[in-house]
């Protein structure tokens, strides 16, 4: 029997948290840990926000993309409480996780913010790395995940007023839609398998966010639109991608809609065939899921530099090439189209980085062993 048990406390959000859950369920199948799922209904309100000057402000906002876990060493009965923060914003932190956990692993990790918050927290904050949504066929206790999702969000939204029953119905509807969406995630085995690119194509398929009132969202949309049009202009015969159709994309960027399937499985099939891919930042400069997907498929990646700090950096000229402006983007694509040896090396190293640092089994195992300060055996 495994010496270690990990308790998953059912989270308020299942899309991002699926990454760690997959790692845990796969490790359980390998016989390295036991996994228990416990219903968890704490609201965990409280967000700490750090500005550029290091000033910390507190609010009662919940932090739903932070998930909670307990690691138990049966040989000593030692318990370690840890949290994973997969929120897009580097400057926001879960007050409950910082106050109650021993370890806090943050996806969008930026040292300037972490230094300001670390001194007042019980939890030690560390880099989580590149993540993406997926699922394991060995996942169990799914009814607990849905029940925890609905009840915890209901608890957050419920007020005893004339809209009491409307709030119950709305929460159920929203979380039912969330449940349907996360059940379309792809099995991790789809990313474990990759094939040599069969097309000499350049892919950049992206999406618009529903709300354009936020200035960061507007900038992202404008940047993505500009890059799509740039790639269309310079590589008219080999460019694949564009905006996924949506209300925002259809209304504002109709001349830049994708020519690639948008269903998750069909998109992944198209990605597997392409040779070169372009990466741009996610919301609030967060590391977008595309990076993990690209690495998994051994793509030749031309990327906007990441601001998030990773446990092991992605290195220019080794796993990918970075671009700072339009000219660099176009020139670096042309370079890898001509230099087959460079393209092959970038492809090989991208896949190796995924296998070593991004695959949910390897990254989750790294986190557990780091907290235990010994290997899982």
Image (cartoon, rainbow, N blue to C red):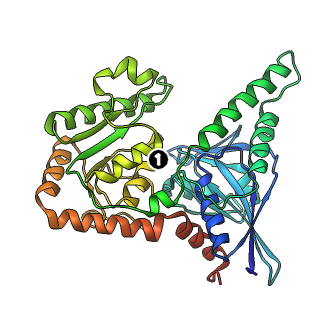
Q: Image height check: is 174 above or below 273?
A: above
Q: Image height check: is 102 above or below 207?
A: below
Residue at 45 percent across and 54 percent down: it is: 308
Q: Quick check: 178 left or right of 315?
A: right
Dot 1 corresponds to which residue?
286
| Residue 310 visible within the image | no
Q: Residue furthest top?
A: 162
Query: Residue 229 appears in which quarter of the rendering?
Result: top left
Q: Image height check: is 40 above or below 360?
A: above
Q: Decide which of 29, 130 is in the foreground and name it.
A: 29
Q: Residue furthest left?
A: 338
Residue at 10 percent across and 57 percent down: it is: 338
Q: Quick check: 276 left or right of 140?
A: left
Q: Quick check: 131 left or right of 136?
A: left
| Residue 290 visible within the image | yes
Q: Decide which of 2, 214 is in the foreground and name it.
A: 2
Residue at 75 percent across and 30 percent down: it is: 172
């Amino acid at each position: 029997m495994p010496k270690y048990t990990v308790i998953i406390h059912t989270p308020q959000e299942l899309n991002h948290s699926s990454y760690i859950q997959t790692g845990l369920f796969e490790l359980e199948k390998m016989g390295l840990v036991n996994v228990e799922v416990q219903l968890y209904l704490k609201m965990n309100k409280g967000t700490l926000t750090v500005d550029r000057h290091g000033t910390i402000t507190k609010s009662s906002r919940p932090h739903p993309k932070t998930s909670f876990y307990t690691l138990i060493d049966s040989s000593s009965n030692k318990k370690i409480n840890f949290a994973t923060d997969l929120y897009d914003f580097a400057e926001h932190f879960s007050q409950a996780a910082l106050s109650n956990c021993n370890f806090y692993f943050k996806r969008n990790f930026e040292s300037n913010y972490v230094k300001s918050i670390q001194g007042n927290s019980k939890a030690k904050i560390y880099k989580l790395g590149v993540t993406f949504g997926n699922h394991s066929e060995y996942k169990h206790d799914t009814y607990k995940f849905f029940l925890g999702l609905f009840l915890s969000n209901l608890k957050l939204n419920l007020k005893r007023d004339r809209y009491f029953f409307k709030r119950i119905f709305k929460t159920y509807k929203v979380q039912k839609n969330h449940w349907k969406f996360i059940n379309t995630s792809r099995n991790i085995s789809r990313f474990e398998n990759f094939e040599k690119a069969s097309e000499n194509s350049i892919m950049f398929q992206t999406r618009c966010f529903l709300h354009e009132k936020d200035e960061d969202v507007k900038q992202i949309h404008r940047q993505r639109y500009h890059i799509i049009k740039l790639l269309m202009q310079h590589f008219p015969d080999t460019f694949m991608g564009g905006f996924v159709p949506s209300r925002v994309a259809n209304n504002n960027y109709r001349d830049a809609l994708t020519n690639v399937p948008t269903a998750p499985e069909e998109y992944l099939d198209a990605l597997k065939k392409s040779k070169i891919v372009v990466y741009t930042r996610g919301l609030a400069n967060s590391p977008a899921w595309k990076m993990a997907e690209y690495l998994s498929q051994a793509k030749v990646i031309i990327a906007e530099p990441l601001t998030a700090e990773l446990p092991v950096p992605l290195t220019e000229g080794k796993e990918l090439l970075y671009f700072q402006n339009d000219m660099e983007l176009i020139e670096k694509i042309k370079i890898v189209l001509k230099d087959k040896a460079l393209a092959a090396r970038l492809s090989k190293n991208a896949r190796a980085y995924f296998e070593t640092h991004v695959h949910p089994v390897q990254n989750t195992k790294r986190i557990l062993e780091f907290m235990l300060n010994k290997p899982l055996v």
